[in-house]
Structure formats: C-alpha cells, structure tokens
Amino acid sequence: MTSTPAPDPLARLAGRTVVVIGGSAGIGLETARRSVAAGASVILGGRDEQRLAAAAKELGDAARWRTVDNTDKDSIAAFFQGVDRVDHLFTPAASYRTGPMRELSDEDAESPFVSKFWGQYHAVRHAAPLLAEDGSVVLMSGAASVRPAGVAPAYVACNAAVEGLGRGLAVELAPVRVNVVSPGMVDGNLWSRRPASVREPAADGYRDAALLGRLGTEGEVADAVLFLFTNTYMTGSTLYPDGGYALR
Ligand SMILES: NC(=O)c1ccc[n+]([C@@H]2O[C@H](COP(=O)([O-])OP(=O)(O)OC[C@H]3O[C@@H](n4cnc5c(N)ncnc54)[C@H](OP(=O)(O)O)[C@@H]3O)[C@@H](O)[C@H]2O)c1
C-alpha cells in the first residue's frame, strides 16, 4: 500500500513575496531566511543600508531591500512606493525606550507607540492595496502584553494595543488574514546588544518564570510567523511563543 505524503504548509510560500519591515536582523531576518528556504522572495526593510545589504547578500537573489524608518509616516509611504506586490507582510521593526512612568520623559514614554504601534499601523495601511487576497499580515507584539516584565507600563500597553490592532485589522481586511506573534524573551540579536548588567538579571528572571525554564530562539519565533503566514484558517489570533511565561 502506498501512503500519501503529508502536505507541507510551507510549500504555500513558494513563489510568493514576503515583505519584512525589520528584516535586516534578529527575528525578522530569521523569518526572511526561512521564507527564502521555502521558495519565497523577500523584501527587507530597515534603517541601516549596510545591515540591509549584508542581510540581502546572505539571502541571495531572492532578496531585495529598501530603507525605511517606521517612526516616519512619509518613509513608510516611500518604502511601499517601491513595492508592487505583497503576499505576506511581517513588521517586527521597532525602536523605543522603556521604563517606569515616574522616570521616563514624555518622549521616551511615547516611543513604543510611535514606532511599534503606529509604525505597524501605517505599514499595514500602505501595504493594504498591494496585499494578495489569499495573503496575510503578521504584527509583532510581546508577551509583556499579558504579563509585564520589569516596570514599563507604556511598553506593556503598547503590546496589548498591537494585539487589539491585529484583531481589528483582521475584521477590516478579510479575506486577507491578520495575526499577531507575541514572543517571550529571546536569546538573540536584540538582547545581545544590551549590557550584561541588564540582560543577565532579566534572563534569570525569565528562566524562573517560564514553564520551559529557558529563553526562546529567533528561529522558534520565526517558525510561529511562518505558521501564521501559511495556515489558511488563522486570522485575528495572537500566538505566544513564550515558553509558558504568561501562565506562571
Ligand atoms: N527579542 C526579544 O526578546 C523580543 C521579545 C518580545 C518582543 N520582541 C519584539 O520584537 C521586535 C524586534 O525584534 P528583534 O528581537 O528581532 O529585534 P532586533 O534584532 O533589534 O531587530 C530589529 C530590526 O528592526 C529594524 N528596525 C529597528 N528600528 C526600526 C525603525 N524605527 N524603522 C525601521 N526598522 C527598524 C532593525 O534594523 P535597523 O536598526 O537597521 O533599522 C532590525 O532589522 C520588537 O517589536 C520587540 O519589542 C522582541
């Protein structure tokens, strides 16, 4: 008896165009790597030309790049003027400061919303006319939305707002699917740039709190993003690749 091979959902990415704003490093670059491995073309966005060029070189002919600063609406509009098709959009780019309400300047307190909330909102707004009907959007949140780590109320609220935005956009953009990925602490590029005096206590606290007793990897989060790109019945959902951090 011959058995039928199990369908490979990632095969749905072959020949598709995946746009990653925040694709020159970290989770976005890992998502781009996996998308290219599945046969997609990628368009990478970020602020730094050298980082973008290096990432695109690594990915080969399937990758193009354009600069964009997601704190600037005009820059986001200009980015999409050079894009003619979007099958899947992922928007992990974010630059912000976090900290206690009683310590942050107003500008710093507002920075998560400026970049991570409005940056993603305007990216989707400009991508919407280009999005394939059977395509999808994945927004980036963070598990601090449901379990605050440290004292950073505006950052916590921003992540919760991104998750609400995902549900709202899923209603507006259907049949285009819109989902959110909300990772826990990742052992990767972002935290490696922070001083050990900040990183190590945060990592120890995370290991204690997470059911799986460890940090995540950029690849584990990227796998969740590719699942949301390719599962054709997922929309309006938030996935938490957080090792069970939010539960304990
Ligand atoms: N890593 C974690 O532990 C973790 C956990 C939960 C949630 N998150 C969320 O995941 C996102 C970032 O993830 P990551 O770990 O992959 O960070 P990352 O390694 O620092 O990568 C960030 C990417 O976004 C780009 N970028 C940053 N600011 C930008 C801006 N204003 N405009 C355009 N591009 C910008 C960066 O390139 P340029 O600097 O050259 O622009 C880079 O390509 C953030 O929303 C963060 O809150 C991360």
Image (cartoon, rainbow, N blue to C red):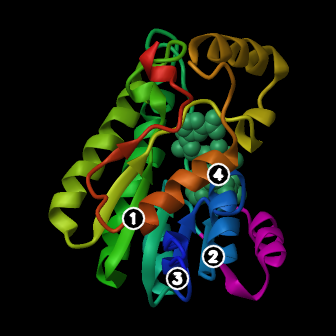
**Does the beta carbon of the residue at mark 1 sit less than 8 Å from ligand 1?**
no
Mark 3 or mark 2: name the one nearer the start of the chain. 3
Mark-to-mark CA distance, 1 and 4: 19 Å
> Is residue 233 depicted above or below 103 in this figure?
below
Mark-to-mark CA distance, 1 and 2: 14 Å
Q: Is 96 left, or right, of 89 in this rendering?
A: right
The answer, for residue 216, to whether it is visible in the render is: yes
| Number of marks in picture | 4
The answer, for residue 66, to whether it is visible in the render is: no
Q: Position of residue 15 (x, y in %)?
A: 55, 89
Q: Mark number for residue 17? A: 3
Task: Look at the numbered disc 2 and give the secondary structure of its residue.
Answer: loop
Q: Quadrant of residue 217?
A: top right
Mark-to-mark CA distance, 3 and 4: 18 Å
Residue at the far front in the pictured view: 1
> Is residue 14 depicted above or below 143 in this figure?
below
Between label 1 and label 4, give the one nearer the viewer: 1
Q: Position of residue 127 (x, y in %)?
A: 37, 74
Residues at badges 3 and 1 in contact (C-beta under 8 Å)?
no
List the residue tagged with mark 1. 231
What residue is drawn where x is 62% and y is 23%?
A: 212
Q: Position of residue 176 (x, y in %)?
A: 27, 72
Task: Look at the numbered disc 1 and give the secondary structure of its residue.
Answer: loop
Q: Which residues are magenta?
A: 48-67
List the residue tagged with mark 4. 27
List the residue tagged with mark 2. 38
Q: Position of residue 25 (x, y in %)?
A: 72, 56
**Callout 4 crowding tier (Cα within 10 Å): few <14, some 14–19, many ≥20:** many
Mark 4 or mark 2: name the one nearer the start of the chain. 4
Mark 3 or mark 4: name the one nearer the start of the chain. 3
Q: Amino acid at mark 4?
A: Ile
What residue is drawn where x is 66% and y is 66%?
A: 34
